[in-house]
Image (cartoon, rainbow, N blue to C red):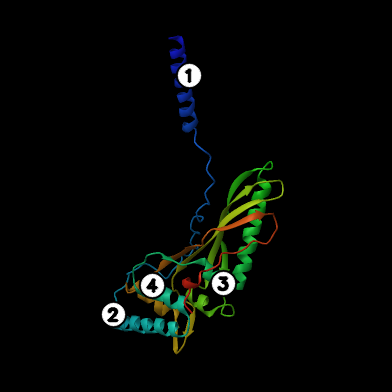
Amino acid sequence: MRSFISILLSGALLASQLHLTCAVPTPRDLAIPPPPADPPKPPKGDGIGPYKSKEASFGDRISKLKFQAMASAADGLGLHNAANNLRHYLDNSGKDLFIPPENMLKDLAGLRNTVQILAQNQASATFKAITGDKGEKAFSSKWTGYYATTTESKDWFYALGGFSVSVTGVVSKTGAKAGTLKYAVHVFDRYNWDNGKSVDIGPFHFEDRELGELHLKGLAREYTVRGTSKVVTVNGFTPGAPIPLPKPKDDDRRD
């Protein structure tokens, strides 16, 4: 009888130990932080003015047809991103447009250099901030301004011009001098047309104000451009070492 009771007690004790073991959560890897909060708007505002704050005329509708034709012309000239962004503006939805930063990095040499330095500095500082030989820590850079020039890419110059870029990631320290880095690149821009500039695309010449008027008349709408790259994993990461950049898939591009 005592042996039977001992067996029951032993079984109950083992079951309770197993239950406690299963109840203890296993540690999870840190998640890569999302993009930083949107950059603040300039003190004087960002954009031409309130949407649909003026009455649209027949001439305004003709003007919109002209810009739709200009988007087609831009496509024919290989300015696919410029055409796509303009069409989204003319579609008049105001919804966010998501673009892959990988394609921008491939086309813009200056942006590649900017992102490389940003990622290296953030990852290296984070690695050094981890005490001991093991541990992990997340990082998130502030937005950094970048301006695409016609020398680098006419497509991105007309598509965005100036925009903001950031990197976020996680550094896992596996030894005193090395570890693993996982990070992503983010881009942000407010797509709008205001006063003081002009653009020539193919046979078309126009003042920025002309396109901006379509927003004021409710025939087009300003919107926000966002983008987050796929995660880049760097095994054997060491502070200061070159960091690979996100690369586009061939089927993500139109040439």
Circle 3 residue: 106
**What label does residue 168 carry, if any?**
none
Q: Earlier in the sequence, mark 4 or mark 2?
A: 2
- With respect to residue 153, does 240 lie above or below? above
**Residue 27 versus residue 11 in the image, above or below:** below
Sort mark 2 into few (<14), some (14-19) or many (20+) by Cα contacts within 10 Å.
few
Tell me which amino acid carries mark 3. Lys
Q: Earlier in the sequence, mark 1 or mark 3?
A: 1
In this rendering, does residue 168 appear at all?
yes
Q: Nearer the viewer, residue 14 or 127?
A: 14
Q: Which residue is mark 2?
A: 57
Q: Is residue 141 visible?
A: no
Label 3, residues with CA under 10 Å away: few <14, some 14-19, many ≥20: some
**Closer to the eye: label 4 or 3:** 3
Asked if labels 3 and 1 touch by Cβ distance under 8 angstroms, the answer is no
- Distance from Cα at disc 1 to Cα at disc 4: 70 Å
Task: Give amino acid for label 4.
Answer: His
Which one is earlier in the sequence, the residue at label 3 or at label 2? 2
Q: Position of residue 56 (x, y in %)?
A: 29, 76
| Quarter of the N terminus within the rendering | top left
Say the numbered circle drawn on residue 88: 4
Q: Nearer the viewer, mark 1 or mark 3?
A: 1
Residue type indicated by callout 2: Ser
Closer to viewer: mark 3 or mark 2: 3
Which residue position holds label 1? 10
Answer above or below: position of 252 versus 177. below
Residue 245 x %, y %: 59, 64
Q: Position of residue 255 (x, y in %)?
A: 49, 79
Is there CB contact under 8 Å for labels 3 and 2? no
